[in-house]
Amino acid sequence: MANLELEGIENLITEVEKLGQQGARIENKALREAGEAMKEAIKQEAPRKTGTLKKSIEVSRVKTKDGAKYVEVGPGKEGWYGKFLEFGTVKMKAKPFMAPGYEKSKERAMDEIEKNLKEGLGL
């Protein structure tokens, strides 16, 4: 799963947190939208033999760990073998698709978060 850390938009996040429950909904929507942007980029990078791996790429629900909210993006149960393609095995060279998809989409994901936070705050 890809990990995206936010830097530089602390002021927007502070304003959203002041809104309480409504702010939580705004944050969650922003994270889901960023996850969707990343999902599409990863799907484009995923190898296509049967199409199962591409179809299995999904965005998780919003999770919280140590006070930080996040979503996970990557293959679901049907695409369990994606980790072998991404990192390789003893007998197979790696054919990464997650890392390139992340790199291609991280700016768009940040833009989605910023856009959704501003929209939610009415800015």
Image (spheres, helix red, strand yellow):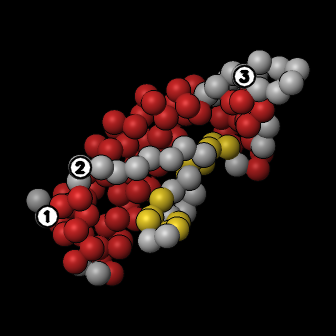
Q: CA distance from mark 3 to mark 1?
A: 45 Å
Residue 112 seen by the camera: no
Name which residue lies at 49% across and 35% down.
102
Q: Name the residue tied to disc 2.
A: 8
Left or right of 5 on screen, residue 41: right
What kind of element bears circle 2?
Answer: loop
Select label 3 or label 1 by which is in front. Answer: 3
Report the front residue among 4 and 34: 4
User: Which mark is first along the chain, 2 or 3?
Assistant: 2
> Mark on residue 107?
none
User: Which mark is first along the chain, 1 or 2?
Assistant: 2
Q: CA distance from mark 2 to mark 1?
A: 19 Å
User: Which mark is first along the chain, 1 or 3?
Assistant: 3
What kind of element bears circle 3?
Answer: loop
Name which residue lies at 52% across and 68% down.
65
> Mark on residue 94?
3
Disc 2 and disc 1 in contact, CB within 8 angstroms: no
Name which residue lies at 29% across and 77% down.
22
Identity, as a three-letter code, of the amino acid under mark 1: Gly
Name which residue lies at 34% across and 65% down.
27
